[in-house]
Image: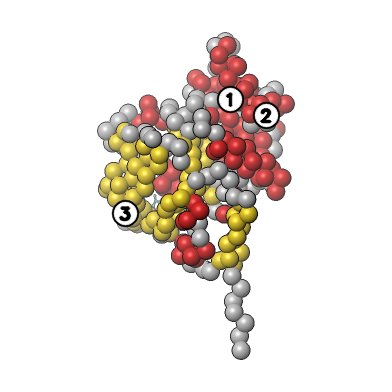
């Protein structure tokens, strides 16, 4: 097992606000983590540190066994795949889907070269097929639906064979069918032993893809619970994290949570 992420007593303070508070967290390469927590809990901040896009105020963060603050973060970021709504906004609308995926091998957004290595072209075609995008290869990014865009961004992120793949709310804004299709693909990807370590932020337990192994629950910058998903994703931990009682159910690795009804008065 290889450690891909280690947070030790991490705090993060901005404008006098304690945004992360004493976070200890460790991720191994075979693990697939879901991060759950209410709005403002610090999930995006956690992702910024895990993608080497910021530094802790105190404590240490090791990404792919390199300590933030002591490593060239540009080199490190080349080994990490990251998909968020912000990465999507940077893609030119006129970019062809095939080029969007292919150019990841050359770390550029927007096609710049007329000749690519045959091995990269084949890899891009394989990944486009894997993410159900083969029919969209010649379509422009700006013409895709939200669901197709998300798949295209993930395809671009995995093109470089990252050692760590982070997805920030990949199924937000998708319709039911698009969400389910994406979850099926993420589930298949998560289950493959050839896939990198994965970390996915979501607001909804319904969006946890089967095959994800661990969960970290964050509340007000503190780790409320963290560990194997079967033991850790419980109605008690959901209540402690979101501050209200839930009824949690699980069926074939899919979770659902609804507010627990108030007991009848009188
Ligand atoms: N530079 C900053 N200065 C002050 N407060 C900040 C700064 N950056 C983030 N925050 C605050 O820190 C808290 C955590 O923010 P963060 O974006 O990490 O939460 P989140 O869990 O991702 O929330 P959401 O689910 O709404 O996306 C928020 O209350 C936010 O307003």
Give the residue at x 38% y 57%: 222
Q: Earlier in the sequence, mark 3 or mark 1?
A: 3
Q: Is residue 160 visible?
A: yes
Which residue ends up furthest to the bottom in the rendered image?
266
Give the residue at x 63% y 29%: 130
What separation in Å lies between label 1 and label 2 (alpha carbons)? 10 Å
Residue 140, x across and y down, in percent: 68, 27
How crowded pointer 2 is (Cα within 10 Å; few <14, some 14-19, many 20+) is rated as many
Give the residue at x 52% y 41%: 167
Q: For this rendering, which residue is in front, 4 or 201?
A: 4
Q: For this rendering, which residue is in front, 189 or 118?
A: 189
Can you say whether 119 is above or below 179 in the image? Answer: above
Can you say whether 4 is above or below 33 in the image? Answer: above
Q: Split into 4 quadrants, where in the image is the C terminus?
A: bottom right
Task: Tell whether 187 sits left or right of 16.
Answer: right
How crowded pointer 3 is (Cα within 10 Å; few <14, some 14-19, many 20+) is rated as some
Residue 252, x across and y down, in percent: 62, 50
Mark 3, secondary structure of its residue: strand
Q: Split into 4 quadrants, where in the image is the N terminus?
A: top left
Mark 1, secondary structure of its residue: helix
Query: What sort of colour scheme is used for the picture?
Result: secondary structure
Instruction: Determine whether label 1 and label 2 are within 8 Å by CB.
Output: yes
What separation in Å lies between label 3 and label 2 (alpha carbons)? 42 Å
Residue with the mark numbered 2 = 133
Q: Earlier in the sequence, mark 1 or mark 2?
A: 1
Residue 221, x across and y down, in percent: 39, 56
Mark 2, secondary structure of its residue: loop
Label number found at residue 101: 1
Residue with the mark numbered 3 = 22
Instruction: Determine whether label 3 and label 1 are within 8 Å by CB.
Output: no
Label number found at residue 165: none
Q: Is residue 89 visible?
A: no
């Amino acid at each position: 097992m290889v450690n891909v992420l280690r947070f030790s007593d991490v705090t993060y303070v901005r404008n006098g606000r304690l945004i992360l508070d004493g976070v200890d967290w460790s991720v191994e390469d075979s693990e697939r983590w879901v991060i759950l927590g209410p709005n403002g809990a610090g999930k995006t901040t956690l992702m910024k540190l895990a993608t080497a896009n910021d530094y802790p105020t105190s404590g240490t963060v090791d990404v792919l066994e390199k300590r933030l603050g002591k490593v060239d973060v540009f080199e490190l970021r080349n080994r990490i795949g990251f998909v968020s709504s912000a990465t999507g906004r940077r893609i030119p609308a006129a970019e062809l889907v095939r080029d969007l995926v292919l150019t990841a091998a050359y770390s550029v957004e927007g096609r710049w070269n007329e000749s690519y290595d045959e091995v990269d072209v084949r890899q891009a075609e394989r990944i486009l097929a894997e993410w159900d995008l083969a029919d969209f290869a010649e379509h422009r990014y700006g013409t895709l639906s939200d669901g197709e865009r998300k798949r295209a961004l993930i395809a671009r992120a995995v093109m470089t064979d990252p050692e760590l793949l982070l997805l920030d709310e990949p199924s937000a804004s998708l319709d039911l069918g698009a969400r389910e299709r994406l979850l099926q693909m993420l589930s298949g990807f998560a289950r493959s032993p050839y896939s990198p370590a994965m970390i996915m932020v979501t607001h909804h337990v319904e969006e946890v893809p089967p095959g994800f192994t661990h969960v970290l629950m964050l509340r007000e910058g503190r780790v409320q619970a963290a560990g194997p998903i079967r033991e850790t994703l419980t109605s008690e931990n959901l209540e402690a994290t979101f501050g209200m009682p839930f009824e949690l159910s699980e069926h074939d690795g899919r979770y659902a949570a609804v507010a627990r009804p108030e007991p009848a008065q009188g």
